[in-house]
Amino acid sequence: MSEPVLSVENLSLRYRVPGGAIAALRNVSIAVRQGEVLGIAGESGCGKSTLAAAMIDLVGTNAEVTSGVVRLNGRDILALSPVDRRRLRGREIAMVFQDPMTAFSPVLTVGAQLVDFQFNLDGLAGREKWRRARDMLARVGLSDPDHAMGRFPHELSGGMRQRAAIAAALLMRPSVLIADEPTTALDVTMEAQIVHLLRQLQADYRCAIVIVTHHLGVIAELCDRVAVMYAGEVVEEAPVDALFHDPRHPYTRALLACDPARIEAATGRLPAIGGRLPDLSSPPTGCSFADRCGIATDRCRAAPPPRVGLGPDRNALCHEVAP
Ligand SMILES: Nc1ncnc2c1ncn2[C@@H]1O[C@H](COP(=O)(O)OP(=O)(O)OP(=O)(O)O)[C@@H](O)[C@H]1O
């Protein structure tokens, strides 16, 4: 099995807030290999976006990594100087956000910005950078790339803008693409098209993709492997088919039961997981999910759960799951 291109090892991160800190990531370990698509799933507030941002070293100024390593192509990026870290972004690792305007300035044309993004390619003439940018827009499915190059970002439709943002991210051929809810702002048809595009690009460029999404349909369509997060921890990690056919962690089971695609036929209503996420300013001593779990015992509330190996690429953080 190939070496991971990106790995996070025992990463803990907290956000400083007035009067304390939010433990947004707790001992997270996860890796993605070349050509693999890793999905990160979980309810709102579980730490998905924080994990994605930490992977590309884009966490906010009130964030503090308290332990752990983020390794990109073998290098510990947290140990690099800020200048070296910035140099990696865009070249070896790039990000696509929910709002494609995040990638662009509103006051420059798409073409000018795509040319600027290639500032690292010293030996390349401006005309060549323009051609590369135009070709990448064509590659991501803009039917008239020459026209799009001359437009301001707001002059493109939402779907076109997201395609242009994906083009911007892939322009330097990074080995890892991090996508944080890239389809959430789009309608269903557009979402399907972007998922299809990501799958094609991944096959063509063999880049690894880490995709954060609350949409389990996107995970099922696109991902090879899934990490399910709950309260700042990865509670289950599994190949995608195994996760959907045989979820092992009680939280994963609850999450799948809540998927909008599985709206209860009888009532037409969406089942919800009862209870709330624990307060991450003082996480519980035992299992974080114990208060909402149907099979929790006293042991679950008293002691942190073990990580139980369940086969290749498969584990769950639970007292009650059997190997
Ligand atoms: N900049 C910040 N300052 C303080 N707390 C933050 C900050 N960003 C996130 N948090 C908190 O960290 C926890 C994890 O948030 P995060 O956004 O990573 O979760 P998420 O699973 O991506 O949620 P969503 O799907 O709603 O984006 C939450 O409790 C959130 O309120």
Image: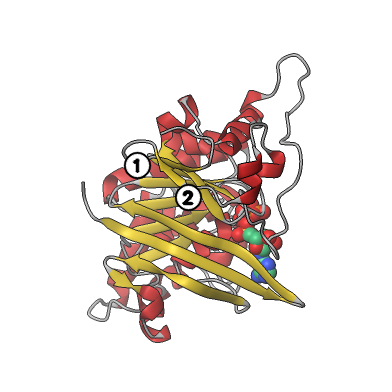
User: Is any atom of residue 223 visible in this view?
Assistant: no
Identify which amino acid the numbered label 2 is placed on: Ile
- Can you give x and y, in whole percent of width and height, for residue 256 in the image? 59, 31
Image coloring type: secondary structure
Q: Quadrant of residue 291?
A: top right
User: Is any atom of residue 242 visible in this view?
Assistant: yes
- Tell whether circle 1 marks a residue whose Cβ is less than 8 angstroms from ligand 1: no
Drawn side of residue 205 relative to residue 181, left or right: left
Residue 33 or residue 15, whichever sits in front: 15
Q: Is residue 109 above or below residue 269?
A: below
Assess whether mark 1 and mark 2 are in contact (beta carbons under 8 angstroms): no
Drawn side of residue 255 relative to residue 168, left or right: right
- Can you give x and y, in whole percent of width and height, for residue 273 in the image? 71, 36
- Can you give x and y, in whole percent of width and height, for residue 136 in the image? 36, 57
Q: Residue at 61% x, 47% y: name it.
A: 184
Instruction: Determine whether the residue tagged by mark 1 lies in a helix, strand or loop.
Output: loop
Residue holding disc 2: 211
Q: Residue at 66% x, 41% y: name it.
A: 298
Residue holding disc 1: 313
Identify the image quadrant of the C terminus.
Answer: top left
Q: Residue at 61% x, 63% y: name it.
A: 24
- Tell whether circle 2 marks a residue whose Cβ is less than 8 angstroms from ligand 1: no
